[in-house]
Amino acid sequence: MVNLSNNTTTTTTPTAGENYSAQEGAFEGPEKLLEIWFSPSPERLKDHQNLSSDESEDDANCVRNQRRRSHAPVEGKTGLRVIPRPVFDKMLALVKCTVLNVISNKDVDAYLLSESSMFVYPHKMILKTCGTTTLLLAVSRLLEIAKNYCGFEKVWRVFYSRKAFMFPERQIGPHRSWDDEVKFLDKYFDAGSSYIVGKERQDQWHLYMTKPSDDVLHHPSSRPIPPHLRGVMQEHEIASGASTPVTSDSEDPSPFGNAGHFHPDQTIEIHMTGLNQEKMKKFYHDASQTESGIPGGKWVDQQTGIDKLYPMATLDSYLFEPCGYSSNAIWDDMYFNFHVTPEEECSYASFETNIPVEKSHANSGEQSPVEALITQVLDVFDPSSFTVTYFTSHHKEHHSHSHMVRSMSALHGYKRTNRILYEFDGYDLVYGHYAK
């Protein structure tokens, strides 16, 4: 059991822009990624959390720590988006990162962090941090502030994932091992399942997820679920030319209610290592070329073509000193981000997006939409090897196992060393690893 009301952890908020991981000498590129969903969608949030539609005087003064039970907008925002910036700053101090800049639209707030990104929707939060940050230490505080400022007393679903660390011995807190991370999450959430995806240890992808439920929060009366009754995953390692499983292709079992949405809930991540050092020169700060910070980020966007990847998106980028780059972008209720560590001895770049490829790269000639996207990203970095995770909810119009497997065929200049299809509850995942 975890006591949400008695959090005695104290911390000092770091200076804005302070890069804790760089100071520690741990240039750990691979990020930790946490998603906590308090409802399946913004539209279902009020009913799922049993909130009222009225705003009382006490609710309006929730910044003074009164409990809020209203779903009424605050300055045009609802749900998690009403939480004040200083509250998030204190939460992020536990993680050991700071806010560099924020961009917003009617659907989402995108926080560019000293160590990666945070996206805040009315009904869910996505927090992604690299280096030696202690991301999971934010879980208790996030649950507490979601309860106090938004009236959220239930969690609908949780995802946590990361690539294998380059320097695992440098990690601290609950991140010293995957087993420690899983045990930490199990203190807060019921019915979680964990998986390690891939063959080679240095290329493996780790995933923890709960099934969709009215409430997966661990409560004092919760009875532990035996390991053998937890979520079941089916794994299909697909060799070239092998037949593809087709079960449930005609169904729409996704817990996200995709019937009301043209595209599935989808996340694509590309993790790249051995970056081309000639191309990496653009990710070093050169005072004769540009300023650092946000102006430098815009310069990198233009020099590399990152600004042309999704021309319709609002882009927010940052060039660090002496090197390194991060960017967030938002397009309606969708996002993408890049994070780059260019140094040769530990070069790493990541790309992540929840923009469905059928929406952004539908007309790509002979390439599938996801192949077209991957090719564009690879052109920026020219890595010696990379992994791709293509995670998508089941959708009546777009769900097909054969389509998922075909989407991860060989890419020009790279040999595919591993490709696996995983079936989860309401989701499919294709994992692929490629090398020159």
Image: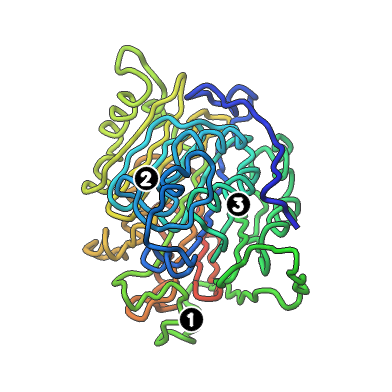
Residue beneath the point at 64% across and 39% down: 134
Q: Amino acid at mark 2?
A: Asp
Label annotation for residue 244: 1
Towards the viewer: 128 or 291: 128
Question: In the shown orientation, is residue 223 left or right of residue 349?
Answer: right
| Residue found at the far top of this picture | 288
Q: Which residue is mark 3?
A: 203
Residue beneath the point at 76% across and 77% down: 228
Q: Position of residue 157 (x, y in %)?
A: 55, 65
Towards the viewer: 404 or 59: 59
Q: Position of residue 129 (x, y in %)?
A: 54, 41
Disc 1 and disc 2: Cα gap in Å? 39 Å
Q: Which residue is mark 2?
A: 109
Residue beneath the point at 76% across and 72% down: 223
Label 1: state its secondary structure.
loop
Q: Position of residue 221 (x, y in %)?
A: 75, 69
Q: Residues within 10 Å of mark 2 (few under 14, many from 20)?
A: many
Q: Amino acid at mark 1?
A: Thr
